[in-house]
Image (cartoon, rainbow, N blue to C red):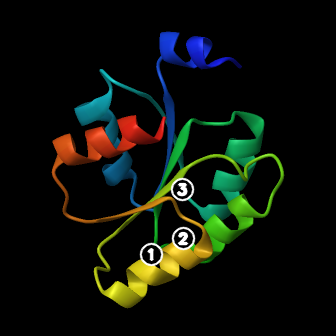
């Protein structure tokens, strides 16, 4: 897809979070700017991202089973998904947690709670 085609359509954001409420909150607040889809786990994130590649993945860190760090590593080591920007979203704010996110391959690490306007700008910069 050309750069011009990407600009003319609504960017697709895949939200990966075991709490559906977080997806609802993001999609309601930012639906004017983005098209949203949802995955409730790391495994469903990978299959969704391959089947319908998003422009950006917002990835929760703390999830049961496959956590955000492992999911990010899988995304970045899978040929079909390795170039999709990943923004980790977490309540974990220590430098060690952020460093672990970047080491796993994320492109951005955002700490909850965050300002919607700030998140909007960060996503726009990634697409």
Mark found first going from the N terminus, 3 or 2: 3
The image shows residue 21 at horizontal and vertical percentages of 32, 51
Looking at the image, residue 38 lies above or below residue 108: above
Q: Is residue 67 visible?
A: no
* Mark 3 to mark 1 CA distance (whole Å): 12 Å
Q: Are marks 2 and 1 in contact (CB under 8 Å)?
A: yes
Q: Nearer the viewer, residue 77 or 64?
A: 77
For disc 2, the marked residue is 68
Residue 75, image quadrant:
bottom right
Residue 30, image quadrant:
top left
How many other residues sit within 10 Å of disc 3, few (<14), some (14-19) or many (≥20)?
Answer: some
11 horizontally vs 21: left or right: right
The image shows residue 114 at horizontal and vertical percentages of 19, 57
Mark found first going from the N terminus, 2 or 1: 1
Looking at the image, residue 63 lies above or below residue 76: below
* Mark 2 to mark 1 CA distance (whole Å): 6 Å
**Residue at 28%, 80% in the rendered image:** 93
How many other residues sit within 10 Å of disc 1, few (<14), some (14-19) or many (≥20)?
Answer: some
**Residue at 73%, 53% in the rendered image:** 82
For disc 1, the marked residue is 62
Mark 3, mark 1: which one is toward the viewer? 1
Q: What quarter of the picture does the N terminus occupy?
A: top right
SS under mark 1: loop
Mark found first going from the N terminus, 3 or 1: 3
For disc 3, the marked residue is 40
């Amino acid at each position: 897809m050309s750069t011009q085609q990407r600009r003319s359509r609504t960017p697709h954001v895949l939200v990966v979070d075991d709490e559906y409420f977080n997806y609802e909150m993001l999609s309601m607040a930012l639906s004017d700017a983005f098209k949203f889809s949802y995955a409730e786990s790391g495994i469903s994130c990978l299959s969704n991202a391959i089947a319908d590649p998003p422009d950006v993945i917002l990835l929760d860190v703390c999830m049961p089973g496959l956590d955000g760090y492992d999911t990010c590593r899988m995304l970045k080591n899978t040929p079909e998904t390795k170039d999709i920007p990943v923004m980790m979203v977490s309540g974990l704010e220590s430098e060690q947690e952020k460093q672990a996110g970047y080491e796993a391959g994320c492109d951005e690490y955002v700490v909850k709670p965050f300002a919607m306007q700030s998140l909007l700008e960060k996503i726009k910069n990634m697409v």
